[in-house]
Image (cartoon, rainbow, N blue to C red):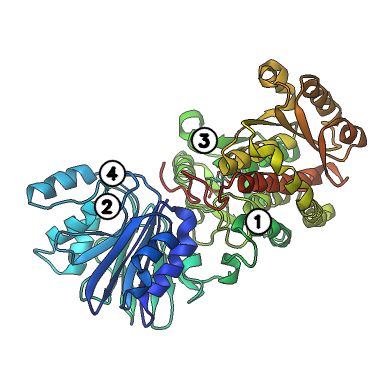
Amino acid sequence: MCGIIGYTGFRKASDVILRGLKTLEYRGYDSAGIAVSGPKGLEIRKGAGKVAEVSESLLFSSLEGNAGIGHTRWATHGKVCNENAHPHANCSKSIALVHNGVIENYLSIKEALSAEGHKFESETDSEVVAHLIEENMKNMPIERAFQESIKALKGSYAIVMAARGENRIFAARKNSPLIAGIGKGEFILASDITAALPYTKKIVPVDEERIVIASEKEIAFYDYSGKEANPNYMEVDWTAETAEKGGFPHFMLKEIYEQKLALPESLAADVKDANALIEKAKNIHIIACGTSYHAGLVLSILLEKQTGKFAKAFIASEYPFIANPEKGTLALAISQSGETADTMQAARFAKAAGAKLLALTNVVGSSLSRLADSTVYLNAGPEVSVAATKTFSSQLALAYRLAYGSEPWAKEIPRAVEKALAQEQSVKSLSSRFKDANDVFFIGRGLSYPIAMEGALKLKELSYIHAEAYPGGELKHGPLSLIQPGTLVVALAPSDESLPKMHGNIKEVKARGAFVIALTDNPEITKEVDFALHVEKSRPELYPFAMLPLLQMLAYYASTSRGIDPDRPRNLAKSVTVE
Ligand code: F6R
């Protein structure tokens, strides 16, 4: 949902900004741009395309100066074109700003400014902010003009602005993520921590409704009335290397492999407060989106079984329409980023109804963790690829911790993942099957059904092949009519209580000519299907971890075999900060 960055300090700003934009590119990659305030005034370069392409053709690195801003875009208002790329400037091109979010009242501001003679070059909501600041600068100094303009905006925004003749950068935040990296003689303002990591580990998650002004010497935080506010400093233990590819062709494959390292960290999380909240709860509403929702489904099954309490997973964007949280409800929000707008609004809705809020997130200081009564961190390290992989297995690990406590067998979880990773070549050999596929069906029962849903989501988002997941028993109620000779069916058939019934479902689709790929440890099924991916025999609870990496790698290789970049699937962005 757009990545933004601002830098001021002793380094060449364009170098820091370009490096930061590459790190932030997972947030959007349809256009990129930079503005640097230096000896030649305020220079702005921007265009449609990925960061590396735009930067190479417009020579971002040739910009001299120590203060500047940058943007990588995921279009919301206005099509993908050079004009709509950020930064956006005012009429006199003396200020330039980058924006992540949606300005809801931009049309009325634009009309009023047009009447004053302002000329707009783009269709974006963001450009009006630059002109509004310019209008206010007629009557007041730049810092006040910035503050007054921000106060007039409705909607969500993280904004960073640079200005001609200024080493200061100006920023504001409301309902969109913004962090400040605190270096020695340098400051970075960015959409997330990873962009600041090469320079500092001292971070301030900027609070809601704050204005930030940074020069090479100092940084100050203000509330909207102009009163100086105390920031909340924290040290992060992520390294810059963990946010880089480390020899893998894509972040996604690297992150699939990182699961074996991330899982012990996640399993070691402190869940004492979380358990106390679960204990006190009358009922549990789990709210999440996409992949995190699939982890929520697993958690709901486990919590209901283990605690006997009503525990239901809701798609966060639907939650306010269909749920009735009350005092005594525990809203348990799962979000890798902790910034997903749908999850945030569902969490606010639950809180407003008197529910307690427990967050499961990977990002320290994220908006969700700040809203929550208690937070459990995934401790999975930064996840850069748009598709969630290691954070999903970490969410599952936390689900197990919350439901089962510290069972000795949980130590076997990372090993189950490692065994699955050893089958990479076998999974890769299947990719030719997916190259020209149009539809793939995933089936599973019990805990395997949410894992099948995750397999289908990964495949569709990364390979653009239509994929659906069904509980095995549902096929005969309709979807079976879609099975024809050659249709691909991925069957999750581990030796748990679902096995006999899944075996029946596999026979049903085989009888109709499907090409069946089974994830199984059962010798009979292995013989009957067209391709078997071996799942290590284990206790039933471990099977989700033994199957998940196989599905992740299947989606990865289906994507690469079709010539797609799995780290940047079309139309998607990692952190979805619009509703
Ligand atoms: C899919 C994927 C998304 C996210 C969803 C929620 O691979 O990553 O479906 O899971 O957008 O994101 P978070 O977990 O950050 O709230």
Label disc, if present, on residue 104 of the rendered structure: 4
x 71%, y 61%: residue: 268
Q: Tell me if 60 is positioned left or right of 390 in this view.
A: left
Q: Residues within 10 Å of mark 1 (few under 14, many from 20)?
A: some
Classify mark 3: helix, strand or loop.
loop
Real-space CA distance between mark 1 and mark 3, rounded to the nearest whole angstrom: 39 Å
Q: Which mark is residue 253?
A: 1
Q: Earlier in the sequence, mark 4 or mark 3?
A: 4
Cα–Cα gap, marks 2 and 3: 45 Å
Residue kind at label 2, given as amino acid type = Glu
Distance between the Cα atoms at labels 4 and 1? 38 Å
Give the residue pinned by disc 3: 325
x and y, in percent, of residue 424 in the image:
76, 52
The residue singled out by tag 2 in the image is 83
What's the residue type where badge 1 is placed?
Leu
- Earlier in the chain: of badge 1 and badge 3, it is 1
Image quadrant in which you'd find residue 525: top right
Q: In this image, 343 relative to 212: left or right? A: right
Real-space Cα separation, disc 2 to disc 4, in angstroms? 20 Å
